[in-house]
Amino acid sequence: MIKQAIIPLAGLGTRLLPLTSVIQKELLPINGKPNLEYIMEECIEAGIKEFIFVIPKDRPAIKKYFFNDSFYKRIIKKKKKDKRLKKIFKKIKIYQKMIKFVYQNKPEGTGDAVLKCKKYLKGSHFLMLLADDLIIKKNCSKEMISLHRKTKGSIIATKKVERKTVSRWGILGFAKKTKNSFLINEVIEKPKLNEAPSNYAIIGRYILPRKILSVLKDQKKGQGGEIHITDSIKTLIKRNEKFYGNIFKGKYLDSGTLEGYIESNLKISKLK
Ligand code: G1P
Protein backbone atom coordinates (compact mmCIF):
# COMPACT_ATOMS: atom_id res chain seq x y z
CA MET A 1 0.00 0.00 0.00
CA ILE A 2 1.31 3.43 -0.87
CA LYS A 3 0.45 5.86 1.88
CA GLN A 4 3.20 8.51 1.79
CA ALA A 5 3.89 11.25 -0.74
CA ILE A 6 7.00 13.40 -0.89
CA ILE A 7 6.59 16.84 -2.44
CA PRO A 8 9.84 18.78 -2.99
CA LEU A 9 9.08 22.46 -2.45
CA ALA A 10 12.48 24.12 -2.36
CA GLY A 11 12.65 25.29 -5.98
CA LEU A 12 13.21 28.99 -6.52
CA GLY A 13 10.52 29.42 -9.14
CA THR A 14 12.67 31.68 -11.30
CA ARG A 15 10.55 30.91 -14.36
CA LEU A 16 7.64 32.60 -12.61
CA LEU A 17 9.40 35.81 -11.57
CA PRO A 18 8.42 38.46 -10.57
CA LEU A 19 5.43 36.67 -8.99
CA THR A 20 7.70 34.31 -7.09
CA SER A 21 9.71 37.13 -5.56
CA VAL A 22 6.90 37.41 -3.00
CA ILE A 23 4.76 34.26 -3.34
CA GLN A 24 6.17 30.76 -3.40
CA LYS A 25 5.20 29.18 -6.72
CA GLU A 26 3.27 26.30 -5.18
CA LEU A 27 1.02 28.79 -3.40
CA LEU A 28 0.15 30.75 -6.53
CA PRO A 29 -3.59 30.39 -6.98
CA ILE A 30 -4.99 28.59 -9.97
CA ASN A 31 -8.63 29.43 -10.35
CA GLY A 32 -8.76 30.45 -6.69
CA LYS A 33 -6.82 27.61 -5.09
CA PRO A 34 -3.07 27.15 -4.59
CA ASN A 35 -1.35 24.92 -7.07
CA LEU A 36 -0.23 22.69 -4.18
CA GLU A 37 -3.77 21.89 -3.11
CA TYR A 38 -4.55 20.38 -6.52
CA ILE A 39 -1.61 18.04 -6.06
CA MET A 40 -2.71 17.16 -2.52
CA GLU A 41 -6.28 16.49 -3.60
CA GLU A 42 -5.06 14.13 -6.31
CA CYS A 43 -2.98 12.26 -3.71
CA ILE A 44 -5.73 12.04 -1.11
CA GLU A 45 -8.15 10.67 -3.69
CA ALA A 46 -5.52 8.06 -4.54
CA GLY A 47 -5.29 6.94 -0.89
CA ILE A 48 -2.29 8.93 0.36
CA LYS A 49 -2.40 9.51 4.14
CA GLU A 50 0.81 11.45 4.76
CA PHE A 51 2.64 14.24 2.96
CA ILE A 52 6.29 15.02 3.45
CA PHE A 53 6.92 18.57 2.30
CA VAL A 54 10.54 19.42 1.60
CA ILE A 55 10.99 23.15 2.19
CA PRO A 56 13.83 25.58 2.82
CA LYS A 57 14.00 26.90 6.39
CA ASP A 58 14.14 30.50 5.22
CA ARG A 59 10.89 30.27 3.22
CA PRO A 60 8.20 29.53 5.78
CA ALA A 61 5.20 30.52 3.60
CA ILE A 62 3.95 26.97 3.03
CA LYS A 63 4.21 26.14 6.71
CA LYS A 64 2.32 29.30 7.52
CA TYR A 65 -0.39 28.54 4.97
CA PHE A 66 -1.23 25.26 6.68
CA PHE A 67 -0.28 26.05 10.28
CA ASN A 68 -1.70 29.43 11.18
CA ASP A 69 -4.22 28.43 13.82
CA SER A 70 -3.96 31.59 15.89
CA PHE A 71 -4.84 33.67 12.83
CA TYR A 72 -7.94 31.58 12.06
CA LYS A 73 -9.02 31.44 15.69
CA ARG A 74 -8.78 35.21 15.93
CA ILE A 75 -11.03 35.92 12.96
CA ILE A 76 -13.45 33.10 13.73
CA LYS A 77 -13.86 34.67 17.17
CA LYS A 78 -14.66 37.99 15.56
CA LYS A 79 -17.01 36.56 12.96
CA LYS A 80 -18.74 33.83 14.89
CA LYS A 81 -21.54 33.37 12.35
CA ASP A 82 -19.31 32.98 9.31
CA LYS A 83 -19.82 29.35 8.26
CA ARG A 84 -17.42 29.64 5.36
CA LEU A 85 -14.55 30.56 7.67
CA LYS A 86 -15.20 27.55 9.88
CA LYS A 87 -15.30 25.30 6.83
CA ILE A 88 -11.96 26.60 5.56
CA PHE A 89 -10.35 26.14 8.96
CA LYS A 90 -11.74 22.62 9.22
CA LYS A 91 -10.17 21.70 5.90
CA ILE A 92 -6.84 23.21 6.95
CA LYS A 93 -6.96 21.17 10.19
CA ILE A 94 -7.44 17.97 8.16
CA TYR A 95 -4.41 18.85 6.03
CA GLN A 96 -2.39 19.68 9.16
CA LYS A 97 -2.73 16.14 10.46
CA MET A 98 -1.30 14.79 7.22
CA ILE A 99 1.75 17.04 6.76
CA LYS A 100 5.33 16.62 7.94
CA PHE A 101 8.12 19.01 7.07
CA VAL A 102 11.67 18.24 6.12
CA TYR A 103 14.26 20.91 5.36
CA GLN A 104 16.35 21.36 2.24
CA ASN A 105 18.02 24.71 2.50
CA LYS A 106 19.48 24.83 -1.00
CA PRO A 107 17.71 23.60 -4.14
CA GLU A 108 20.08 20.66 -4.60
CA GLY A 109 17.76 18.49 -6.64
CA THR A 110 14.96 15.98 -6.36
CA GLY A 111 17.31 13.19 -5.28
CA ASP A 112 18.64 15.24 -2.40
CA ALA A 113 15.05 16.12 -1.41
CA VAL A 114 14.10 12.43 -1.25
CA LEU A 115 17.21 11.55 0.74
CA LYS A 116 16.31 14.19 3.30
CA CYS A 117 12.98 12.38 3.94
CA LYS A 118 14.70 9.16 5.00
CA LYS A 119 13.67 9.22 8.65
CA TYR A 120 9.98 9.42 7.77
CA LEU A 121 9.76 6.83 4.99
CA LYS A 122 8.08 3.66 6.18
CA GLY A 123 6.71 1.34 3.48
CA SER A 124 8.49 -0.47 0.64
CA HIS A 125 7.43 2.25 -1.85
CA PHE A 126 6.36 5.88 -1.75
CA LEU A 127 4.99 8.46 -4.14
CA MET A 128 6.93 11.55 -5.18
CA LEU A 129 5.29 14.42 -7.02
CA LEU A 130 6.67 17.58 -8.60
CA ALA A 131 4.22 20.33 -7.80
CA ASP A 132 4.73 22.17 -11.12
CA ASP A 133 3.28 19.28 -13.02
CA LEU A 134 -0.48 19.35 -12.82
CA ILE A 135 -2.43 16.53 -14.37
CA ILE A 136 -6.13 17.12 -14.71
CA LYS A 137 -9.23 15.23 -15.81
CA LYS A 138 -7.98 11.80 -14.69
CA ASN A 139 -6.20 11.00 -11.43
CA CYS A 140 -2.66 10.09 -12.46
CA SER A 141 -1.50 9.01 -8.97
CA LYS A 142 -4.43 6.59 -8.80
CA GLU A 143 -3.53 5.08 -12.17
CA MET A 144 0.08 4.68 -11.05
CA ILE A 145 -0.83 3.05 -7.74
CA SER A 146 -2.99 0.59 -9.60
CA LEU A 147 -0.12 -0.25 -12.03
CA HIS A 148 2.17 -0.66 -9.02
CA ARG A 149 -0.29 -3.10 -7.43
CA LYS A 150 -0.41 -5.11 -10.64
CA THR A 151 3.35 -5.18 -11.35
CA LYS A 152 4.79 -4.75 -7.82
CA GLY A 153 7.36 -2.52 -9.53
CA SER A 154 8.24 1.15 -9.43
CA ILE A 155 6.29 3.51 -11.67
CA ILE A 156 7.02 6.74 -13.53
CA ALA A 157 4.33 8.90 -15.13
CA THR A 158 5.08 9.53 -18.77
CA LYS A 159 3.72 11.08 -21.90
CA LYS A 160 4.89 11.50 -25.45
CA VAL A 161 6.44 14.89 -26.14
CA GLU A 162 7.58 16.53 -29.35
CA ARG A 163 10.93 15.08 -30.40
CA LYS A 164 12.59 18.46 -30.64
CA THR A 165 11.86 19.14 -26.94
CA VAL A 166 13.52 16.00 -25.48
CA SER A 167 16.38 17.94 -23.93
CA ARG A 168 13.90 19.66 -21.57
CA TRP A 169 12.86 16.38 -19.91
CA GLY A 170 13.96 13.15 -18.35
CA ILE A 171 13.46 10.63 -21.16
CA LEU A 172 12.55 6.95 -20.90
CA GLY A 173 13.65 4.04 -23.07
CA PHE A 174 11.79 0.75 -23.52
CA ALA A 175 11.80 -2.35 -25.75
CA LYS A 176 8.07 -2.78 -26.21
CA LYS A 177 4.97 -1.10 -24.94
CA THR A 178 1.27 -1.67 -24.53
CA LYS A 179 -1.31 1.08 -24.87
CA ASN A 180 -0.89 2.39 -21.33
CA SER A 181 2.50 1.23 -20.07
CA PHE A 182 5.96 -0.17 -20.74
CA LEU A 183 8.87 -1.71 -18.90
CA ILE A 184 11.63 0.91 -18.77
CA ASN A 185 15.11 -0.17 -19.85
CA GLU A 186 16.77 3.24 -19.93
CA VAL A 187 16.39 6.69 -18.46
CA ILE A 188 18.33 9.86 -19.26
CA GLU A 189 17.97 13.29 -17.72
CA LYS A 190 17.65 15.97 -20.41
CA PRO A 191 19.40 14.15 -23.28
CA LYS A 192 20.54 15.67 -26.54
CA LEU A 193 18.19 14.90 -29.41
CA ASN A 194 20.49 12.21 -30.82
CA GLU A 195 20.92 10.55 -27.42
CA ALA A 196 17.24 10.27 -26.54
CA PRO A 197 16.03 6.65 -26.49
CA SER A 198 12.43 7.74 -27.24
CA ASN A 199 10.23 10.78 -26.93
CA TYR A 200 8.40 9.56 -23.82
CA ALA A 201 9.13 12.12 -21.12
CA ILE A 202 9.04 11.81 -17.36
CA ILE A 203 6.22 13.92 -15.95
CA GLY A 204 6.51 14.69 -12.23
CA ARG A 205 4.99 11.60 -10.60
CA TYR A 206 7.08 8.68 -9.35
CA ILE A 207 6.40 5.59 -7.28
CA LEU A 208 9.83 4.78 -5.89
CA PRO A 209 11.21 1.96 -3.79
CA ARG A 210 12.58 2.77 -0.36
CA LYS A 211 15.83 1.13 -1.39
CA ILE A 212 16.53 4.11 -3.66
CA LEU A 213 17.81 5.81 -0.49
CA SER A 214 20.89 3.61 -0.41
CA VAL A 215 21.68 4.60 -4.02
CA LEU A 216 21.10 8.28 -3.31
CA LYS A 217 23.40 8.18 -0.32
CA ASP A 218 26.43 7.70 -2.57
CA GLN A 219 25.22 9.50 -5.67
CA LYS A 220 27.39 12.19 -7.21
CA LYS A 221 25.92 15.47 -8.40
CA GLY A 222 24.66 15.38 -11.99
CA GLN A 223 23.46 18.01 -14.48
CA GLY A 224 23.48 21.55 -13.13
CA GLY A 225 25.27 20.40 -9.96
CA GLU A 226 22.07 18.82 -8.60
CA ILE A 227 21.35 15.33 -7.31
CA HIS A 228 18.72 14.07 -9.72
CA ILE A 229 16.35 11.28 -8.83
CA THR A 230 16.65 10.24 -12.49
CA ASP A 231 20.29 9.23 -11.96
CA SER A 232 19.48 6.90 -9.05
CA ILE A 233 16.58 5.41 -11.01
CA LYS A 234 19.12 4.69 -13.75
CA THR A 235 21.34 2.85 -11.27
CA LEU A 236 18.41 0.80 -9.98
CA ILE A 237 17.35 -0.15 -13.52
CA LYS A 238 20.91 -1.34 -14.19
CA ARG A 239 20.57 -3.50 -11.07
CA ASN A 240 17.48 -5.08 -12.64
CA GLU A 241 14.94 -3.27 -10.50
CA LYS A 242 11.63 -3.12 -12.39
CA PHE A 243 10.45 0.35 -13.38
CA TYR A 244 7.36 0.87 -15.52
CA GLY A 245 6.29 3.91 -17.52
CA ASN A 246 2.63 4.76 -16.93
CA ILE A 247 1.28 6.55 -19.99
CA PHE A 248 -1.29 8.54 -18.10
CA LYS A 249 -4.72 9.40 -19.47
CA GLY A 250 -5.18 12.86 -17.95
CA LYS A 251 -4.14 16.21 -19.38
CA TYR A 252 -0.75 17.56 -18.41
CA LEU A 253 -0.32 21.23 -17.49
CA ASP A 254 3.10 22.71 -16.72
CA SER A 255 2.31 25.36 -14.15
CA GLY A 256 5.98 26.18 -13.56
CA THR A 257 6.32 28.67 -16.42
CA LEU A 258 4.32 31.85 -16.87
CA GLU A 259 2.80 30.61 -20.12
CA GLY A 260 1.91 27.26 -18.56
CA TYR A 261 0.59 28.93 -15.42
CA ILE A 262 -1.79 31.05 -17.47
CA GLU A 263 -2.88 28.00 -19.47
CA SER A 264 -3.46 26.06 -16.24
CA ASN A 265 -5.78 28.82 -15.02
CA LEU A 266 -7.72 28.82 -18.27
CA LYS A 267 -8.03 25.03 -18.54
CA ILE A 268 -8.90 24.47 -14.88
CA SER A 269 -11.50 27.25 -14.87
CA LYS A 270 -13.32 25.34 -17.63
CA LEU A 271 -13.47 22.09 -15.69
CA LYS A 272 -16.81 21.14 -14.18
C1 G1P B 1 12.18 17.55 -13.67
C2 G1P B 1 12.83 16.19 -13.89
C3 G1P B 1 12.66 15.71 -15.32
C4 G1P B 1 11.18 15.70 -15.69
C5 G1P B 1 10.56 17.09 -15.41
C6 G1P B 1 9.05 17.05 -15.61
O1 G1P B 1 12.88 18.51 -14.43
O2 G1P B 1 14.20 16.27 -13.53
O3 G1P B 1 13.19 14.42 -15.46
O4 G1P B 1 11.01 15.34 -17.05
O5 G1P B 1 10.82 17.51 -14.08
O6 G1P B 1 8.49 18.30 -15.37
P1 G1P B 1 12.71 20.10 -14.18
O7 G1P B 1 11.34 20.47 -14.68
O8 G1P B 1 12.85 20.32 -12.72
O9 G1P B 1 13.80 20.74 -14.99
Image (spheres, rainbow, N blue to C red):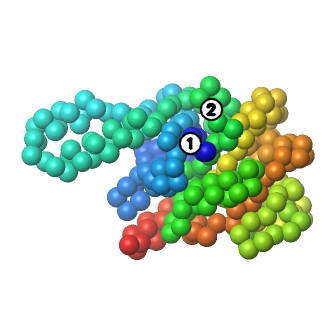
Depth check, front residue: 48 or 111: 48
Judge from the rendering whether residue 42 lies leftward or rightward of residue 108; answer left or right.
left
Q: Is mark 1 within 8 Å of ligand 1?
A: no
- Callout 1 environment at 10 Å: few (<14), some (14 to 19), or many (20+)? some
Q: Are the two marked residues, 2 and 1, in contact with CB atoms closer than 8 angstroms?
A: yes
> Which kind of residue does numbered mark 2 sit on?
Lys
Judge from the rendering whether residue 46 lies leftward or rightward of residue 272; answer left or right.
right
Which of pointers 2 and 1 lies earlier in the amino acid sequence?
A: 1
Quarter where residue 217 is shown:
top right
For the point 16% across and 49% down, which residue is it?
A: 83
| Helix, strand or loop status at disc 2 | loop
Q: Position of residue 113 (x, y in %)?
A: 64, 35
Q: Position of residue 147 (x, y in %)?
A: 68, 58
Depth check, front residue: 250 or 123: 123
Q: Is residue 33 above or below residue 268?
A: above
Kindly report the distance in space between the C-alpha atoms of the residues bearing marks 2 and 1.
9 Å
For the point 57% across and 58% down, which residue is it?
A: 142
Residue 232 is at least partly visible in this image:
yes
Judge from the rendering whether residue 119 lies leftward or rightward of residue 48; answer left or right.
right
For the point 78% across and 30% down, which residue is it?
A: 214
> Which kind of residue does numbered mark 1 sit on?
Lys
For the point 74% across and 33% down, which residue is it?
A: 213
User: In which quadrant of the rendered image does the C terminus lie?
Assistant: bottom left
Q: Is residue 25 above or below residue 99?
A: below
Q: Position of residue 115 (x, y in %)?
A: 68, 32
Q: Position of residue 230 (x, y in %)?
A: 77, 47
Pointer 2 residue = 122
| Helix, strand or loop status at disc 1 | loop
Pointer 1 residue = 3
- Callout 2 environment at 10 Å: few (<14), some (14 to 19), or many (20+)? few
